[in-house]
């Protein structure tokens, strides 16, 4: 039988390139470069969706949303997150809380965190205080520190309610 509380972890990375919008947590951020990827490449939202899948051992995002699936080309990752959360709810669980970290050397993200939390809380049907989003740099170290990409990690708990 399943546990009443489960935990999931998600990790994602996308390269930063010219000519793409930068979207994190569904918020468009003014930046000369954006993340490359199949959907809107919203690395934060992908990490959270991956954590939700992981909490129920449902595999990874690429399995459920292959980049050959035209439905998700250029799609908002908030829609993808909603689709993943529907799978969680189908199994009788709801989100307990989420703690996520964005690792980006640039741009500075602190001013956008509240809007990201609001977007994510709306999709996941919780109050914003159940969604933590932290942003840090990589202290100039390695590829992320050189601004070649952005990483996001997330941990979620889900609670069995039905
Ligand atoms: Zn991704």
Image: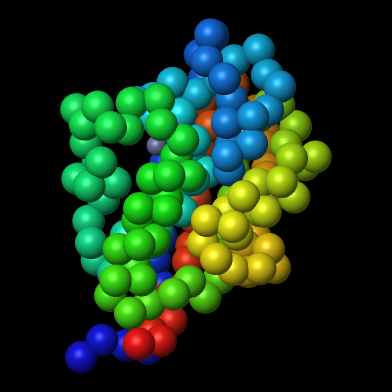
User: In this image, 146 relative to 83: left or right?
Assistant: right
Left or right of 23? Residue 78 is left
The percent position of residue 120, horizontal first and vertical second, equals 58, 53
Residue furthest top as drawn: 19
Q: Which residue is located at x 75 percent, y 50 percent?
A: 114
Residue 10 in sight in this render: no
Colouring of the image = rainbow
- Where does the image place residue 97, in percent across and percent down from the top left? 55, 70
Q: Give the residue displayed 64% in from the left and 29% down from the top.
A: 28
Number of callouts in the render? 0
Nearer to us in this view, 159 or 139 = 159
* Residue at the outermost right position: 111
The answer to whether residue 97 shows anywhere in this view is: yes
Q: In this view, does 59 lie above or below 88?
A: above
Residue lying at 80% horizontally and 40% vertically, measured from the top left? 111
The percent coordinates of residue 146 (x first, y second) are 59, 21
Residue 91 left/right relative to 118: left
Looking at the rendered image, the quarter that the C terminus falls into is bottom left
Instruction: Say above or below: 24 vs 100.
Output: above
Which image quadrant: the N terminus?
Answer: bottom left
x 33%, y 79%: residue? 92
- Image-quadrant location for residue 2: bottom left
Viewer-proximal residue among 118 and 57: 118
């Amino acid at each position: 039988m399943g546990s009443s509380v489960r935990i999931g972890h998600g990790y994602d990375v996308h390269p930063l390139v010219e000519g793409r919008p930068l979207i994190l947590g569904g918020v468009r951020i003014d930046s000369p470069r954006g993340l490359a990827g199949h959907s809107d490449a919203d690395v934060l939202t992908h990490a959270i969706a991956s954590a939700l899948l992981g909490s129920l051992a449902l595999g990874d995002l690429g399995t459920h949303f292959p980049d050959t699936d035209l439905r998700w080309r250029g799609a908002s990752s908030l829609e993808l997150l909603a689709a993943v959360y529907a799978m969680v709810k189908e199994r009788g669980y709801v989100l307990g809380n989420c703690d996520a970290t964005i690792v980006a050397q640039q741009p500075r993200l602190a001013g956008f965190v509240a809007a990201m939390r609001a977007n994510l809380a709306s999709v996941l049907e919780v109050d914003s205080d159940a969604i933590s989003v932290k942003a840090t740099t990589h202290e100039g170290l390695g590829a992320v520190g050189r601004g070649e990409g952005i990483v996001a990690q997330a941990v979620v708990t889900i609670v069995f309610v039905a």
